[in-house]
Image: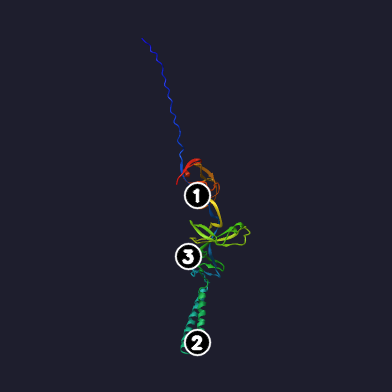
Amino acid sequence: MFAISGIPLSACYWPETPQETTKEEQIKVKAITLKKEPYNETKVYHGELQFSKSASFVAQQSGIVTRLNARPGQKVRRGEVIAAYPPLNHQLQVDRARIEQDKLAQDYTRQQELFKAGAVSKVSVDTYKTQLDVLVKTTQQLQDMNTIRAPFSGIITQVPIKIGEEVGMGQALFSMAETVAVEVNFYVTPQDIAHMAIGARTYLNLSHKKIEGKITRTSIQMDPKRKAFLVTASFKNEGVLFAGTHVAIALETGASLSSIWIPVESLKQLGNRHYVFVIEDGKAIETDVKIGQRNETSVQIIEGLEVGQHLITAGSEKVEGNSPVITVQ
């Protein structure tokens, strides 16, 4: 019997090691080349909104309010009767004047008939006519005594009285304002007053509308308490019914400057920090910036960016610092 000795055979297996050769995927973004653009510097001031023309009325003597065509916010026309507050014996005086006027009118008619008949002279007729004209005007003035008419078209702003109330001399009756235009009074520093030219453009955001106006008055004397100068800007009224609101206005200083402006969507914010992404060597670089003025579409960059850099304007939400990027149209 033969013994067969087995020779052990061993096989060696070398696993294949795949080589990582795939490049990191590039993120598609849109970018612009930064440049300086001219703009007119603007500053923001705060002031009180008022009507350009207003008037307040007080009783010139005592009386009873018998007519009151006024309530806050009501529109009135020039010449319209707003209030009447005749004295206690007023109606008796008016009735007596009317009786005397009617009697004189009859005498005047009689004089005209006599003149036609040759019984009186033309001078006599003219004398009666003059007397009648004076009495008619006197009666009308008496009838309109303590009657106030609107001196201009506008709206009623305040009415502290009511019908049937007895008012005394000097008592407030009502206030009204012209509604064609509004004004904003604000104060500026001695340094800023030099740039406040009459006619300079200003802008007021009112009721979600941007209204253009202009500087109409500037003070030449400094307010000693505020250490500032009073300036008035006028605007077309766009629905203001009541004054006294505090508003902000933007004023063009007239200084033409150049600066880097970027789209608002490119600016990122984290707390008080502002930053953007620029492209350097094919990568998105997170860059801190200091901003200045801004409007609905653009932001002024004061520090952090330079002319010629490539700013990511779309796709920045997909990138992080040093992410590889590729620009597309």
Which of the two labelled residues, at mark 1 and mark 3, occupies the earlier sequence position? 3
Give the total of numbered labels.
Answer: 3
The residue depicted at 50 percent of the width and 59 percent of the height is 211
Amino acid at dot 1: Val
Farthest residue in the left direction?
1
Q: Nearer the viewer, residue 299 or 148?
A: 299
**Splitting the image into 4 quarters, where does residue 226 fall?**
bottom right
Q: CA distance from mark 3 to mark 2?
A: 50 Å
Q: What SS does tag 1 mark?
A: helix
Q: Is residue 189 above or below residue 106?
A: above
* Dot 1 crowding, Cα within 10 Å, few <14, some 14–19, many 20+: some
Amino acid at dot 3: Lys
* Dot 2 crowding, Cα within 10 Å, few <14, some 14–19, many 20+: few
Q: CA distance from mark 2 to mark 1?
A: 89 Å
Task: Give the image location of residue 300, x and y in percent.
Answer: 53, 51
Mark carried by residue 122: 2
Task: Give the image location of residue 252, x and y in percent.
Answer: 55, 57
* Dot 3 crowding, Cα within 10 Å, few <14, some 14–19, many 20+: some
Relative to 11, is 165 on the left or the right?
Answer: right
Which of the two labelled residues, at mark 2 and mark 1, occupies the earlier sequence position? 2
Farthest residue in the bottom direction?
118
The residue depicted at 51 percent of the width and 77 percent of the height is 137
Farthest residue in the top direction?
1
Q: Is residue 139 above or below residue 176?
A: below
Q: Looking at the image, do the residues carrying marks 2 and 1 touch, with CB atoms under 8 Å apart? A: no
Amino acid at dot 2: Lys
Mark carried by residue 126: none
Q: Which residue is mark 3?
A: 75
